[in-house]
Amino acid sequence: MSLPIAPKLTQISSGKAATKLLKKKANEFLACTRANTVLEEILEHYKECLARKAPITPCLLTLEYLFTQLFLRAEIRPADIDAQPTYVPSAKDPQANHRQWLLAQYQETCGLVVDGMQHEKESEACQALATAMKLLAVQCVQQPEFDRFPATGLKQILTAMLSSQCLNKHLFSRFLEYSSHLDVIFYCWKTVPSLVSRNGPPTDVFKQNFLLLLDGIMFGKEKLKETDSVLCVPLGSNGFDYAFIRKQINRTWGFVMNWEHSETVHQQLLILLLEKVFVHLDKPVLLTDFLMDSLDVGGAVSVLALQGVFVLIQQHNLTYPNLYEKLYSMFEPEIFHTKFKARLFYLADIFLSSTHLPEGLVAGFAKRLARLALIAPPQDIVIILRFVGNLILRHPALKRLIFHPTGGEASSDPYVMEERDPLKSKALESSLWELAALQNHVLPSVASAARFISNPLPSVEWDLSEVLEINENDIFHKEMMSKTKEFFVNVDRPTGLFGYCGGQLASQYWKLF
């Protein structure tokens, strides 16, 4: 009677059977690492899964476990990886042959794992990234006497993430798990300038991926206080070389600024600049022309550029002569449908906070916002009402706009909405009749907010931060909670399940037969 022949991996597509057989094959190879055909069979199965776009997680976990054990047992030495010679079998030294063969298999495996990061299923691609990073870490963490960071392997991983065809948001989200470590940040920045394409203009997808990478490895000044947050190797006695990294950041940002930007890339770049890059730039004033040009783009790009201009004015003494005309022109109906509208109101509140501004200038803003309130969504009407109220509190002379003797009717309003200069809009000759009209709004919360012009004004300004993030769901919930909880649907209060209906007992209408 012959023994049953164990199935091959190629005969089992996926599922628990394949996972169980992979684990068995891995243990079989670790028991005798000279069983070359076992490892080759595992790698062939992995290649086949990649080609068929089948799940690769079982293979990845198996290879990760297998090579981790080989590093722990020192059968693969990290010092030999970068200086690995071409594998040529020799009859004189079988032991050296075997070590070279293992190194060659490891190098091939690393390449295949990186290829897995392009898997069409995001969960499989993220697992390939996790395995690739763990294989880097095991080279050093398991053998601390080897204190050289595997920069070559890291560059291979970053290159795969910076695809020109596929947007890899999922990979960069998973990469944040590793980019919080100081050694990963340091060696990423050491590598990033070499990853910028110099063979022509990159695609929009590459630009978005590149900005996602910069976002992932950018850090705040508080990060410099950490000393023990490393993935692979400590950074030595000198610690985190911030001067070198800052030089790399400025160099890389110079490449990015020379690209031509689509609207999507432009927004992504400005957000990254405002939130993370500004503090690391040596000469932020060099961004003046870029930000000025961005102000003319319109929409969300202009709002983000306005914040950059504000930083330059506040921190670097920049002078922008037509700033208020530009800010005035940004208040268009379209602004209510962008996700940066709260940012615009916040910045406008800061720019208009000075009590030394011309009365006609502030009146132009108040009137324009009041006119926009007639067509704005309810949640934005509340913001506008609070904003205009604060302008009147800062400039008491604007109270004349509440009940102007000659500008109180819509049909004869002298205000010129199409004028781009607030000083020439004739706002001082008009009145805020729009706010009076909003007192009859269908929503009680809006109507109540508009009644401030009919009541004595408060002594302190309204806090805009309380209403900037309000959405339609908040308003709906508030209105529902303000209504009575008891709804009457009967003329007479019922006394039981069955009652009289038209002089007859209602129970008879419920009989089926």
Image (tube, grey):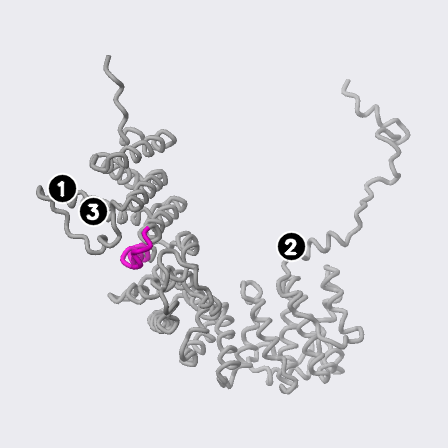
Q: Residue at x 72, y 85 (%)?
A: 397
- Residue 489 belongs to magenta span: no
Q: Tell me: 433 left or right of 196.
A: right
Position of residue 82 measured from the top left corner of the image (x, y, whole percent) = 22, 56
Alpha-carbon span between mark 3 and mark 1? 15 Å
Alpha-carbon span between mark 1 and mark 2? 73 Å
Crowding near pointer 3: few (<14 within 10 Å), some, many (20+)? some
Q: Which residue is mark 3?
A: 104
Against 419, residue 93 (above or below) is above
Q: Which residue is mark 1?
A: 94
| Label 3 vs 1, first from the N-terminus | 1
Which segment did they paint magenta? 143-160
What label does residue 473 carry, if any? 2
Crowding near pointer 1: few (<14 within 10 Å), some, many (20+)? few
Q: Nearer the viewer, residue 418 or 161?
A: 161
Foreground mark, 3 or 2, reads 3
| Label 3 vs 2, first from the N-terminus | 3
Amino acid residing under circle 3: Ala
What label does residue 167 carry, if any? none
Contact, CB < 8 Å: mark 1 with mark 2?
no
> Is residue 164 shown to the viewer in this render?
no
